[in-house]
Amino acid sequence: MKILSPAKINLFLHVTGKRSDGYHDLVTIMCYVSLYDTISLTTHVKKTTVSCSNPEVPEDETNIAFKAADIFLNRLNRQEGVKITIKKEIPVAAGLGGGSSNAAAVFLGLNRCYGYPFSLDDLMAMGISIGADVPFFLFGKPAIASGIGEKLEVCYGLSSYKILLIYPGFGVSTAEVYKNVDLGLTKCKKTHKKTLLGKCKFNAAYHLYNDLETVVISRHPEIIAIKEALLSNGAKGALMSGSGPTVFGLFSDHDKARRANHVLSKNSEWQLFLTDMVIDAGCIIDV
């Protein structure tokens, strides 16, 4: 079985507080983009193994896809494993949710292999135990997420933008970024939250916002240069995704997006991906 495991972007991210368990509460809009890792699963083997085309990804029990398989099979009381092979296209530690997406793909693939023993709610409960973004990748639709990311509502009214992702060539630690968020300095207006939760039509000029940008920019000011490059080449809006450092530009004009991709790809330090916003699917299973 093969599963296409998508990246995500955060169109809006406001950190509302820190919890006693170390996680942060937030309100965010997340959607999928058409940049995919490919997960291959071989079931009914003696033990669980994972291999990945990207050497930065661990190939042991610390891998989040491995953890997903382990939790699933334990819940099913199966004394066997699964062979997981990951072909990586999504950059690692990039704010695009690649690891969480891979874990969700394993949950969905195994659930299908074993005859759907678990409901979506069951899978989400398993998923949140290993990563705050895993439930979103199981959800299958653009979402307004709250809590630590586990409370999900369908986000309606998104336009199907062309999206240019720019990964600057280095990763960042999500834990370190959240650790350095100054909750007293977050600039989100209450009207943003009310509007989002009211399911209004998304407006790139009004809604694009990320509390975590300030933290990452203070260490990597090139984030500003990437945003300015996207805007000066026709993007309607540009924002860092999640905990970064990937920056995305939203284009309503496909020709402008292609021209921006051509121009900005001349920077040899940046990795560019010209993608589409996906509003009708999450992980895609191909048997």
Image (cartoon, rainbow, N blue to C red):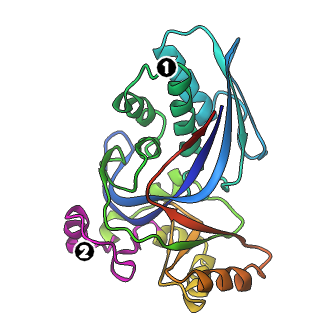
Quadrant position of residue 191: bottom left
Asked if residue 93 can be seen in this view, the reply is: no
**Neighbours of disc 1 within 10 Å: few (<14), some (14-19), many (20+):** few
Which residue is found at the position 47% from the left and 45% from the top? Answer: 137
Along the viewing direction, whichever of 199 and 59 lies nearer the viewer: 199
Residue lying furthest bottom in this view?
Answer: 232
Q: Secondary structure at mark 2?
A: loop
Residue 145 lies, with reference to residue 49, above or below; the image says below
Which residue is found at the position 37% from the left and 61% from the top? Answer: 29
What's the amino acid at mark 2? Lys
User: Which residue corresponds to mark 1?
Assistant: 115
User: Which residue corresponds to mark 2?
Assistant: 189
Magenta-drawn stretch contains 146: no
Asked if residue 79 can be seen in this view, the reply is: yes
- Report the side of 174 relative to 20 (left or right): right
Q: Where, quadrant-wise, is the N terminus in this rendering?
A: top right
Magenta-drawn stretch contains 208: yes
* Magenta region, residue range: 186-212
Quadrant position of residue 82: top right
x and y percentages locating residue 151 in the rendered image: 30, 45
What's the amino acid at mark 1? Gly
